[in-house]
Image (cartoon, rainbow, N blue to C red):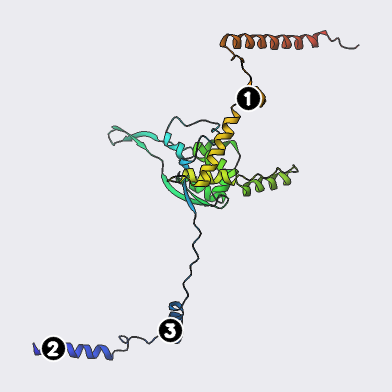
C-alpha cells in the first residue's frame, strides 16, 4: 500500500514538471475579450418574427381555380410542388426470369423558404428535382412567377395558390411594371392588397384568426354577397322577374344557332356573287 502511494506521488510530481502539462496563462487579449463579453449590456429588442405558412392550407375559395384542374392520379401532388413526378410501377426480374411487381415513390422532402415579398416563410412538400430547379432559377419567387405554360402545368394546384398569393404583393406588382416598361407598355396602377395577403397567411397558419383577419373576412363576405347580383343594382329590388326555364333556354340557343348558320351561309354566297373584273 505504501509503495502504491509513493509511486502515485512520483507520477504526479513528474506530470507537474512537464511543460506540456502546464496550463498556459491567458493572454491580455483573451482576458479583455472574455471580460467584454461578460460586461455586454442586455438587449431588449425583439427578434423580427416571421410566420411559417403551410402552402396546402391557403384558402382555395379565395384563389382562382387552377386552369388545368386537380390531378386525378397521385392526388398527394395537389398539396405541394411535385412537378411531373408520379408513382412509377415496374418489375424486379430475378436471374431465372421471375418477375416481382414493385413501385417507386417520388423523392419527396419538406422545405421552408423565406419569401421577402410576403414577409413569411412558406413550408411545403417538394421533390428533389423541383428543389434543384428552384436553386437554378434563383429562389422560390422566380420559380413561381415564371409564366411559361410548361411551368404553370408543372406547378400544380399547390404551386398555383402560392403563385397567386405572391402576385398580390406590391413588390411583385412593381416587378411586373418594370417588365412592362422595358417592353414599351404602360405600367398598371399598384393596388394595396396587404389585408388580403395577411388574411391568407393567417388562414394558412394553425390557430384562430386575428382581429384584423376577421374584419377582412367580413369585408370579403359582403363583397361576395353584392357580386351575386348580376347587372345593375336596381334590378335586385324588382319583383316578378321569372327565372329562365330549360325549355326557354333550349329555344333561345336553337334560335342563336340558326342565326349563326344563316350568317355563315350568307358569308359563303358573297364571294360567289362578285365577278372578276376583265
Query: Is the residue 135 above or below the residue 88 in the image?
Result: below
x then y, percent, for residue 251: 62, 8
Q: Name the residue that disc number 3 marks.
A: 31
Depth check, mark 2 against mark 3: the one in front is: 3
Q: Pick the residue in front: 148 or 98.
A: 148
- What residue do we see at 38% from left, 87% from top? 25
Question: What crowding class fits label 3: few (fewer than 14 Cα within 10 Å), some (14-19), or many (20 or more)?
Answer: few
Look at the numbered disc 1 and give the secondary structure of its residue.
loop
Separation (CA) of disc 2 from disc 3: 38 Å
Depth check, mark 1 against mark 3: the one in front is: 1
Q: Quadrant of the N terminus?
A: bottom left
Query: Residue furthest toward the right?
Result: 278
Depth check, mark 1 against mark 2: the one in front is: 1
Query: Residue furthest toward the left?
Result: 1
Horizontally, residue 128 falls left or right of residue 166, namely: left
- Is the C-beta separation of discs 2 and 3 under 8 Å? no
- What residue do we see at 67% from left, 12% from top? 256
Of the numbered discs 2 and 3, the one sitting upstream in the chain is: 2
Q: Name the residue that disc number 1 marks.
A: 230
Separation (CA) of disc 1 from disc 2: 103 Å
Numbered label attached to residue 5: 2
x then y, percent, for residue 110: 42, 47
Look at the numbered disc 3 and give the secondary structure of its residue.
helix
Horizontally, residue 26 falls left or right of residue 145, namely: left
Mark yes or no: residue 99 visible: yes
Q: Pick the residue in front: 53 or 210.
A: 210
Question: What crowding class fits label 1: few (fewer than 14 Cα within 10 Å), some (14-19), or many (20 or more)?
Answer: few
Amino acid at each position: 500500500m505504501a509503495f502504491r502511494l509513493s509511486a502515485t506521488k512520483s507520477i504526479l510530481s513528474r506530470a507537474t514538471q512537464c511543460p506540456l502539462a502546464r496550463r498556459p496563462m491567458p493572454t491580455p487579449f483573451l482576458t479583455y475579450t472574455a471580460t467584454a463579453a461578460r460586461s455586454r449590456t442586455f438587449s431588449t429588442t425583439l427578434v423580427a418574427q416571421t410566420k411559417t405558412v403551410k402552402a396546402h392550407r391557403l384558402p382555395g375559395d379565395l384563389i382562382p381555380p387552377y386552369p388545368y384542374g386537380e390531378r386525378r392520379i397521385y392526388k398527394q401532388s395537389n398539396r405541394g410542388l411535385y412537378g411531373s413526378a408520379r408513382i412509377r410501377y415496374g418489375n424486379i426480374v430475378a436471374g431465372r426470369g421471375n418477375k416481382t411487381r414493385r413501385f417507386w415513390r417520388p423523392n419527396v422532402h419538406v422545405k421552408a423558404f423565406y419569401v421577402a415579398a410576403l414577409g413569411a416563410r412558406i413550408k411545403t412538400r417538394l421533390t428533389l428535382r423541383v428543389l434543384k430547379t428552384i436553386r437554378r432559377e434563383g429562389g422560390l419567387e422566380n420559380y413561381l412567377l415564371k409564366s411559361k405554360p410548361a411551368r404553370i402545368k408543372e406547378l400544380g394546384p399547390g404551386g398555383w395558390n402560392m403563385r397567386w398569393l405572391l402576385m398580390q404583393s406590391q413588390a411583385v406588382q412593381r416587378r411586373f411594371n418594370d417588365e412592362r416598361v422595358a417592353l414599351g407598355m404602360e405600367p398598371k396602377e399598384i393596388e394595396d392588397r396587404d389585408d388580403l395577403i395577411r388574411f391568407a397567411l393567417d388562414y394558412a397558419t394553425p390557430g384562430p384568426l386575428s382581429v384584423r383577419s376577421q374584419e377582412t373576412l367580413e369585408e370579403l363576405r359582403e363583397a361576395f354577397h353584392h357580386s351575386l347580383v348580376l347587372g345593375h343594382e336596381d334590378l335586385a329590388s324588382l319583383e316578378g322577374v321569372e327565372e329562365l326555364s330549360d325549355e326557354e333556354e333550349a329555344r333561345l340557343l336553337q334560335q342563336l344557332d340558326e342565326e349563326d348558320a344563316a350568317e355563315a351561309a350568307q358569308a359563303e354566297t358573297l364571294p360567289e356573287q362578285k365577278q372578276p373584273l376583265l
